[in-house]
Image (tube, coloured by chain):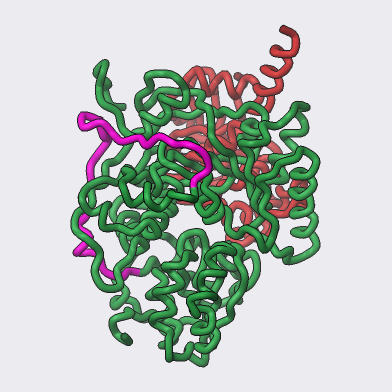
Chain colours: A red, B green
């Protein structure tokens, strides 16, 4: 797995998926443009400030609430490369893995605008402003395999191909 | 992580996930388990359909349940297109478990009404409140759309077997206290992430006294404490409830006496009274009489509290009374079955005579979709499950979560009110 380097946007605890993308945007005509609506109710204009590769650093229980896969998809479409949070709501965590938005469970004391470097292989996050290091548990093998495969659908396709070849 | 001794007893979650994966699984293990049913709704369906079609295979038709409920009857052109996508998918693949508008209702109520849910089953749904079915002793949990697509193709999904919190209930509920008040108290006590990645497993003498409708409400909101599942030990009341309703055979699963739990909690149901969750967290819970808030809207409905028992208790309070002149009351039964029964029992007439708006089944205003969206500064007392910022409309609106009894009493007085103060 590669490393991820990006600019930090800070969020608090219990950021719910209604905040990430409100229900009224959840129609199929929006599926490819969800990114423009992220945090529109609570942080208007946020989508236009995000640059490709930016990283969200949040507190506890990020992505709680609705199961809407639109939430991690919206963040990814907006350019967010990775979410670092003290903890994640479980459905958001699973959805993120499946759509290629990396969720990392770690407490990070970065400030908004800091550049952080996430070393996925080593399990280390470095804040480039002050060199401070934060350590996280690497994924269990099952989860690493899922990420390496490119998410669950990619894995299913691979399995289907293999069973056809046999 | 708990240390597991070989042969150690199992929780309901460990047992169901072991059976469904043909492994000897304990909390913390990763398993691939066979699912009995996978459900999607009109919002989560389209992504699942597109992901599924990218796999190029035949779906496991009989495991799939398609229920439009969030933005139907179509509230605008995009939601019409979205609902049409589900209808087309059902036709294209010959999926008979599709519940058209007027013949279904809110997905979780339909899953229960139509007998998909039974003890011991493993059911997933692309809707976070899929955990509702734990009320009947099933392991059920919310998943994403891509995961639903994978289930369409393979009929199985990976799970990390969750730890369980044992919630022991004693006694019985009194007066106007309901399952809604119980689960709000639990969320208050453990926090909105207090059961993250875990199952809330309910047992004890108090379970027997708790009607199925209250259990459904409790399990429904387990996810509001972060729980993966909220499972009641099934009893005779469940088996009776399922007679003539359930599809196929089932085999109930009970926890072992020596099962190991992450923690234990005790609730004496006698001590539960009406409570309200204030904005903007389901864990921000206060006794009703401590809350002095005027309201603009009272909403009765949703997968949490849109059942016939909820309609009955609200109607009993509203009978012969009027909704306050400055309040709109909106009543939305959870399914066509509930709607018909409420009509037959004369409940709809009571609501209409009281000055309430009554509609057919849909998720409606619960998630700010339609039929009761709030304007800036407006406040709604609601029998729903979430009061997040902007959940029911404008970001500066407020939602107060409460039981149907509190919703009805508050609709009459125009401010959040304990039912005992007017009845």
Residue A63, horizontal then vertical, whole percent: 52, 46
Q: Is residue A48 left or right of residue B347?
A: right
Q: Examine the residues drawn in magenta and state their main secondary structure.
A: loop
Q: Is residue B242 left or right of residue B90?
A: left
Residue B133, horizontal then vertical, whole percent: 45, 47
Q: Residue at x 31, y 46 (%)?
A: B235
Q: In front: A148, or A109?
A: A148
Q: In front: B128, or B63?
A: B63
In the rendered image, the residue lying farthest to the front is B244
- Quadrant of the rendered image containing residue B230: top left
Q: Is B278 located above or below residue A104 in the figure?
A: below
Q: Is residue B85 visible?
A: yes
In the rendered image, the residue lying farthest to the top is A166
Q: Is residue B119 left or right of residue B37?
A: left
Residue A43, horizontal then vertical, whole percent: 60, 58
Q: Residue at x 41, y 24 (%)?
A: B18
> How many callouts does the rendering have?
0
Q: Is A119 located above or below residue A104 in the figure?
A: above
Q: Quadrant of the N terminus of chain A?
A: top right
Q: Is residue A86 visible?
A: no
Q: In front: B4, or B280?
A: B4
Q: Tell whether position B250 is magenta.
A: yes
- The region drawn magenta spans B246-275
Q: Is A53 located above or below residue B87 in the figure?
A: above
- Quadrant of the rendered image containing residue B29: top left
Q: Residue at x 46, y 64 (%)?
A: B305
Q: Tell whether position B400 is magenta.
A: no
Q: Is residue B17 left or right of residue A39?
A: left
- Quadrant of the rendered image containing residue B59: top right
Residue A30, horizontal then vertical, whole percent: 76, 51
Q: Quadrant of the C terminus of chain A?
A: top right
């Amino acid at each position: 797995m590669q490393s991820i380097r990006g600019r930090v946007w800070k969020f608090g605890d219990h950021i719910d998926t209604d905040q990430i993308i409100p229900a009224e945007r959840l129609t199929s005509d929006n599926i490819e443009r969800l990114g423009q609506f992220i945090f529109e109710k609570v942080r208007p204009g946020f989508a236009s400030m995000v640059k490709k590769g930016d990283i969200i650093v949040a507190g506890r229980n990020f992505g709680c609430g609705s199961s809407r896969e639109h939430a991690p998809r919206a963040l990814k479409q907006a350019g967010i490369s990775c979410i670092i949070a003290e903890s994640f709501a479980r459905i958001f965590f699973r959805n993120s893995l499946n759509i290629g938005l990396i969720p990392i469970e770690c407490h990070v004391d970065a400030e908004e605008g800091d550049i952080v470097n996430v070393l996925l292989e080593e399990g280390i996050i470095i804040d480039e402003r002050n060199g401070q290091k934060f350590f996280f548990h690497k994924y269990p093998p099952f989860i690493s395999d899922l990420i390496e495969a490119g998410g669950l659908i990619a894995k299913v396709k691979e399995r289907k191909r293999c069973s056809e070849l046999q | 992580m708990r240390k597991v001794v070989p042969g150690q007893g199992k929780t309901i979650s460990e047992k169901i996930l072991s059976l469904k994966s043909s492994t000897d699984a304990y909390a913390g293990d990763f398993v691939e388990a066979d699912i009995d049913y996978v459900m999607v709704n009109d919002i989560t369906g389209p992504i699942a359909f597109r992901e599924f079609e990218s796999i190029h295979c035949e779906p496991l038709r009989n495991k799939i349940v398609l229920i439009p409920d969030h933005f139907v009857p179509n509230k605008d052109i995009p939601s019409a297109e979205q609902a049409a996508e589900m209808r087309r998918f059902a036709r294209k693949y010959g999926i008979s478990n599709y519940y058209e508008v007027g013949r279904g209702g809110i997905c979780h109520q339909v899953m229960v009404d139509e007998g998909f849910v039974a003890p011991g089953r493993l059911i997933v749904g692309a809707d976070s409140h899929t955990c509702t079915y734990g009320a009947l002793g099933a392991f059920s949990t919310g998943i994403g759309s891509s995961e639903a697509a994978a289930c369409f193709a393979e009929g199985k999904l990976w799970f990390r077997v969750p730890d369980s919190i044992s919630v022991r209930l004693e006694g019985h509920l009194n007066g106007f206290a309901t399952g809604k008040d119980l689960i709000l108290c639990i969320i208050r006590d453990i926090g909105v992430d207090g059961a993250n990645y875990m199952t809330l497993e309910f047992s004890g003498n108090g379970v027997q006294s708790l009607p199925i409708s209250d259990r459904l409400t409790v399990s429904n909101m387990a996810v509001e404490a972060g729980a993966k599942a909220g499972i009641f030990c099934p009893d005779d009341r469940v088996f009776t409830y399922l007679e003539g309703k359930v599809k196929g055979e089932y085999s109930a699963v009970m926890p072992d006496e020596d099962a190991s739990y992450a923690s234990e909690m005790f609730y004496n149901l006698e001590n539960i009274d009406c409570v309200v969750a204030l904005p903007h967290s389901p864990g921000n819970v206060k006794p009703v009489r401590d809350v002095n808030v005027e309201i603009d809207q009272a909403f009765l409905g949703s997968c949490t509290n849109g059942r016939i028992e909820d309609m009955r208790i609200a109607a009993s309070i509203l009978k012969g009374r009027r909704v306050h002149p400055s309040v709109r009351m909106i009543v939305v039964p959870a399914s066509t079955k509930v709607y018909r029964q409420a009509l037959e029992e004369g409940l709809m007439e009571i609501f209409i005579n009281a000055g309430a708006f009554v509609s057919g089944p849909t998720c409606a205003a619960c998630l700010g979709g339609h039929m009761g969206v709030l304007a800036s500064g407006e406040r709604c007392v609601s029998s729903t499950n979430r009061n997040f910022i902007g959940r029911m409309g404008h970001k500066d609106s407020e939602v107060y979560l409460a039981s149907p009894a509190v919703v009805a009493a508050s609709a009459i007085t125009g401010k959040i009110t304990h039912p005992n103060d007017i009845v």
